[in-house]
Image: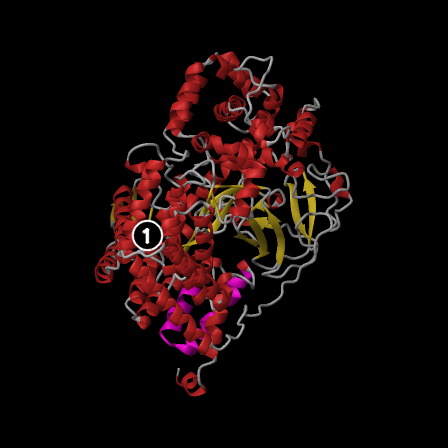
Amino acid sequence: MALPAEEWQGRAARLWAALDPALREWLAAASLHDAVRLGCDLLRTKEEEEAALVRLCRRVCTDKEPAAASWYREQGNREFGRHQYQAALRLYSKAASHEPPGSPEVSVCFANRSAALFHLGHFEVCLEDIARAEGHGYPDRLLPKVLLRRAECLLCLGRLQDAQDALRVVESKIAVDGLMTSSAHQTLLKKLSQLKMKLHEKQRCPEPAREACGDIPGKSERWEENVSISGASSSLSLNFDTERGRHLVASQDIVPGQSLLKEEAFVSVLCPGENLPLQGGETAWDTGATNADLYCHRCLRQLLASVPCQGCSYAKYCSQHCADVAWEQYHRTECSLGALLLTLGVFCHVALRTVLLAGFAEVSRLVGWSHGGDKDLQNPEARCKPLSEAPDAGAGARGIPGCDSNGQYQSSYQALFHLLPHIEQHSPEHKFLCTLSVVAICKQLQAAGLEAAVLSQESPEQCLKPKTSEKTSDELSAELKTVAEAMLRHVLQLQCNAQAITVMQELGPGDGAVVNKKPVRLATAFFPVLSLLNHSCCPNTSVSFSGTAATVRASQPIPRGQEVFHCYGPHRCRMGVAERQQLLRQYFFECHCQSCLEELEPDVKSVVSMRNSFCCPKCQAQMQGEEDTLCCSNEACATSASRENLSCRLQDLQQQIQKASDLLSARKADQAIKMLLKCQMDAGSFLSPEHLLMGEMEDHLAQVYATLGKWQEAARHLKKSIEIVEMHHGPSSVETGHELFKLAQILFNGFAVSEALSTIQRAEGILSVHFGPQSAQIQELQEMKACLSELPRNILQRT
């Protein structure tokens, strides 16, 4: 949810409509400084708006609730009893996030979670949770069972001396407790005896040392750092002209797969997912997992056993280190504002965190600079003179906004501040909504006594002390008005400069031989250097992410002097030119890339629209027409059909395919096959054979047959899917690479050795261009290839 909750948007719209027309006209042309002052005045006089926002925030649950913790723990115990250890793990983590730190209850959550981790084979992480349980005061009477689990983990890890020491601790603990005759005590003694015997056997017959397999060596990437552009390759230069603004150009010939940019996000905020944690009712205590439960809120690593924030139930981290760093840098301020930030949307959250990471001194300096009186300060690129198109633009870069005094463009707050906010292009209503939202956050900072933390003037402990001030309680301080102005600038910048950090997320249960993944938006971030790349509907780069770091690679040859492009979303392979131009309006420019110019030529029809078209139910020719009634393109056939009717059929078909996918997830393969085959028959009567949905059905059928171990049938369907994907996206596209990766898995499991090896080679060649030679998929492909290559020669010859 990038923008505020719909209810707050509605209230802002009604308040805007009630303003005097002259005031609305004034605000439409007002500077950020004046807009913030008006927002402060309005929220001070319109107390009902602030009260409404408070009510909205009460619906969002970010506080710790012991009742929720107890409920999650019980649900976790239930799943554990059913041997659903992954589900139990997630529920124990949710329970721990709601328990107050240092309580016996939170220690029980960690101990229970360690049991789930043990059964899942995550022994090292299990040991960490056992240590957490002890550190939070795990009940003494229950300690022997947990200590036995620690000893068993150490045994499984081959740490025999540590395991022996752990067993001695358990033995002495039981001896101190005295004689007990309960069945639980007898079970402990029996388990202790079994582990001692197991330890003795391992000491007597030690397992042979495993060969260090390590990572399969991959190709080393050529990289030379650019002296003028932070994180960029030396093969790039920074240029400027009035038409394209700041942009990156190849200063030498670039080959596909070559790394061009490696940048850590200046700021990133995890997207909460579709459903916010609501207060009260069953929806508040949902057992489902969202991004907030699955990924670290600081580094975005996937979570296994999360470390909860000590102050709220929302923020979770992969380690205590991440929790401590986040608290020091920004979360000490954000923690108590969790419900407000979730209500006002990710863009407002990113804006606040940006200011906190930059520090008030730098924010104040740049905001003060923007008040210099030049009307072009809100559009800094308008003051630049065109630079020479020469490849070496290092000296000339001093004239480009965002560069430091040495002419270097760093991934810094100064560079971020100079990204265009497009103040004049945003609608007055949108600017008004953003203004009210950032002012509301700053007012809450002041009311909560967090102003000093924002201004970096006091320690977190001092921030909690009540403040004495001469100004009235509802008047925003001059410093917080500066913060609000910077935040408003950043919210407006995000419209055109927000970068979605994506991750490949598994679909379905994820326990099959073939893993199906799709890219999912994980976080919203500012990348000052990556933002220099202009858009093209046919880009020459590919962007991948690892945590909060972005890597840009060339996806095709880029000759010296050619601009380096990135796709903002609308791609020529996914939609026609009219739809692309419509979506690109949010970025306040009209695309003139080569693909758009070609498709805008008279009598040129989009390849996408032709391939994803409806076909005649009688002769299978393409249906055409601009009106509500479509006619067969075959002049000998007079068939016509309603566009609305065909669109409804397409929608129904998509719903049926989703039901089939759900059946597959529920492990009802036979029913899924029947439904998909029926869908294929229906689709063939009104969709083009090249329609992407036809390929999607083939892909689903391949997955179903793979779950049944029918590898040849699975490969046959997936090859049909690949043919359609190649038609739409091209033979070297990342989409084709992902499909080939799945085909390699199927052929590998089906023991089709020679075909598997050739498919692996092709998939490796494509995916290494887009993700680099060290990516997880490349490593898996190399492992499959190594395994197949080690087979006896006579088997290789037969296959």
Q: Is residue 255 above or below residue 38?
A: below
Specify whether residue 60 is painted magenta: no
* Crowdedness near tag 1: few (<14), some (14–19) or many (≥20) residues, C-alpha within 10 Å: some
Q: Residue at x 43, y 67 (%)?
A: 156
Which corner quadrant holds the N terminus?
top left
Asked whether 203 or 699 is in front, the reply is 203
Left or right for 117, reference 429: left
For the residue marked with disc 1, what is the amino acid? Ser
The residue beneath circle 1 is 633
* In the foreground, 308 or 274: 308
The residue range painted magenta reads 741-770
Residue 592 placed where, x, y %? Answer: 56, 43
Let me know if residue 332 appears in the view. yes
Q: Is 765 in the magenta?
A: yes
Numbered disc total:
1
Q: Residue at x 50, y 74 (%)?
A: 210
Is 80 in front, or is 589? 80
Q: Main secondary structure of the magenta part?
A: helix
Q: Secondary structure at mark 1?
A: loop
Q: Is residue 633 above or below residue 43?
A: below
Q: Is residue 565 left or right of residue 796?
A: right
Q: In this picture, is 311 found above or below 167? A: above
Q: Is residue 371 above or below residue 539?
A: above
